[in-house]
Image: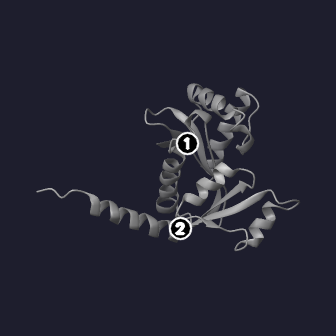
Amino acid sequence: MLKKREVNGHECRILFDLMTHPDVFPFVRQKAFSYDEFVFLTKQTIEAEERNELISRTILDEWENPIGTINLYDIDSKSGFLGTWIGKPFHGKGYNNMAKEAFFQELFFEREIETVYMRIRKENIRSKKAAEKLPYTIFSNETKPEIFNQLNRTEYVYDLYEVPKDLYTMTFIRNSAVEEETQPMEA
């Protein structure tokens, strides 16, 4: 479902073509206006991950084809900002939730991240609804005013959501217990 980013011509070409779709491009944080620029940004992303400035993964479909990226940017004090995009042909098929689940497990259980923030454009209804469906997401415009104000210095552009490790962990444990209860017992 997820793999480390790499500079692979085939993968970069597919991701660039998916990213430039008009329904996707406005919501991508690291915009590339040409294929060469996309390759350059991918190289920069890999180098930034080596410096522990961010964490970036390629999202794969069930046939291991690249369909988007998921990233934790601006890592500071065990927290960072989530950035996810998935190609238009894969919207509404559950890949976003699957990618977030796998990524949050890595961040919280392997990487010592304590809080994941999501800044979502107030007009991006699709992403806001997706965030609000997650049982461990908190709407944080009022509870984190310093971060909210930093995101919206000149005008109100972004809503702020957060995923705290403790709430995610509690939900993960609860869901794991429910799955165990529903598994058939072997004789």
When the figure is inspected, residue 48 is found, relative to residue 65, above or below; the finding is below
Q: CA–CA distance between discs 2 and 1?
A: 26 Å
Q: Residue at x 40, y 67 (%)?
A: 173
* 101 with respect to 24 (left or right): left
Q: Nearer the viewer, residue 126 or 145?
A: 126
- What element does badge 1 sit on? loop
Query: The residue under label 1 is which amino acid type?
Result: Gly
Q: Residue at x 75, y 41 (%)?
A: 26
Q: Residue at x 68, y 51 (%)?
A: 125
When the figure is inspected, residue 152 is found, relative to residue 57, above or below; the finding is below
- What element does badge 2 sit on? helix
* 84 with respect to 149 (left or right): left
Can you see residue 53?
Answer: no
The nearer-to-camera label among 2 and 1 is 1
Residue 77: image tag: none
- Residue named by callout 2: 165
Q: Nearer the viewer, residue 150 or 97?
A: 97
When the figure is inspected, residue 153 is found, relative to residue 97, above or below; the finding is below
Residue 92: image tag: 1
Crowd class of label 2 (few under 14; some 14 to 19; many from 20; radius 10 Å): many
Query: The residue under label 2 is which amino acid type?
Result: Lys
The spot of residue 88 in percent (x, y) is 62, 35
The spot of residue 178 in percent (x, y) is 34, 64
Q: Earlier in the sequence, mark 2 or mark 1?
A: 1
